[in-house]
């Protein structure tokens, strides 16, 4: 029988645009094909040129590598400049935070994540249905992955 998730009554979250999750710390922003297309279109670039300018390949198990945005030398996201400069076309990973499978694993992880995100636990109530739809969207959109032979 399927376990009832801790978020059965929904979770509150409204981003206050503090940028804490886009700056200061190293991290990966993985891109799917729709993410890459949206960002390349916004910047009017070919996707290959966009990858060369703004992306990096991150090693994954089995010798595969996955496409992520770069970050600046100060560890800010490559697109952060007084806020997100590609907000309308931001990747699904950014749009779906904090409703990530890893954050929703347990109430403890949710609460721990909320320590560094002032938008979590307040604001708009996202229902269980909203959250599960968000999770399905993430699982249905694969990260762009390069085969070991392509390296
Ligand atoms: S840390 Fe939370 S509130 Fe701040 S920008 Fe990120 S999602 Fe929004």
Image: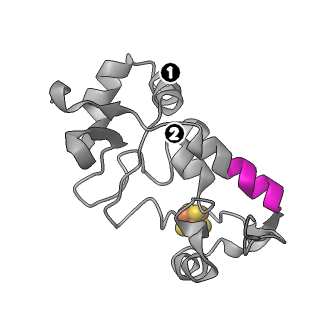
- Residue 37 placed where, x, y %? 49, 24
Which element carries disc 1, helix, strand or loop?
helix
Is the C terminus in the top left, top right, bottom left or bottom right quadrant? top left
Mark carried by residue 108: none
The part of the image, by quadrant, that contains residue 47 is top left
Q: Which residues are magenta?
A: 127-134
2 and 1 marks in contact (CB < 8 Å): no
Q: Residue furthest front?
A: 1
Tell me if residue 30 comes above or below residue 50 in the rendering: below
In terms of sequence position, does the residue under pointer 2 or pointer 1 come before the other?
1
- Residue 62 placed where, x, y %? 23, 44
Q: Is the shortest distance between ligand 1 and the CB of mark 2 under 8 Å?
A: no
21 or 16: nearer the eye?
21
Tell me if residue 84 comes above or below residue 122 in the rendering: above
Question: Label 2: which residue?
Answer: 86
- Residue 7 placed where, x, y %? 75, 71
99 lies left or right of 81: right
In the image, what residue occupies the spot 50% across and 21% down?
41
Give the crowd class for mark 1: few <14, some 14-19, many >=20 residues within 10 Å: some
In the image, what residue occupies the spot 80% across and 61% down?
128
Tell me if residue 125 comes above or below residue 35 in the rendering: below
Question: Label 1: which residue?
Answer: 41
In the image, what residue occupies the spot 45% across and 29% down?
36
- How far, Cα to Cα, is label 2 from label 1? 11 Å
Picture quadrant of ligand 1: bottom right
37 lies left or right of 61: right
7 lies left or right of 19: right
In the image, what residue occupies the spot 40% across and 62% down?
23
The part of the image, by quadrant, that contains residue 66 is top left
Queried whether the magenta region covers residue 41, the answer comes back as no
């Amino acid at each position: 029988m399927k376990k009832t998730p801790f978020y059965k009554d929904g979770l509150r979250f409204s981003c206050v645009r503090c940028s804490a999750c886009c700056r200061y710390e190293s991290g990966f922003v993985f891109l799917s094909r729709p993410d890459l297309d949206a960002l390349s279109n916004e910047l009017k670039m070919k996707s290959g040129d966009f990858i060369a300018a703004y992306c990096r390949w991150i090693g994954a198990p089995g010798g595969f590598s996955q496409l992520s945005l770069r970050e600046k030398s100060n560890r800010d996201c490559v697109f952060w400049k007084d806020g997100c400069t590609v907000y309308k076309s931001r990747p699904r990973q950014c749009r779906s935070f904090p409703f990530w499978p890893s954050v929703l694993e347990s109430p403890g992880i949710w609460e721990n994540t909320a320590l560094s995100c002032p938008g979590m636990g307040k604001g708009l109530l996202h229902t269980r249905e909203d959250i599960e739809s968000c999770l399905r969207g993430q699982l249905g959109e694969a990260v762009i992955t390069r085969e070991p032979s392509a390296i």
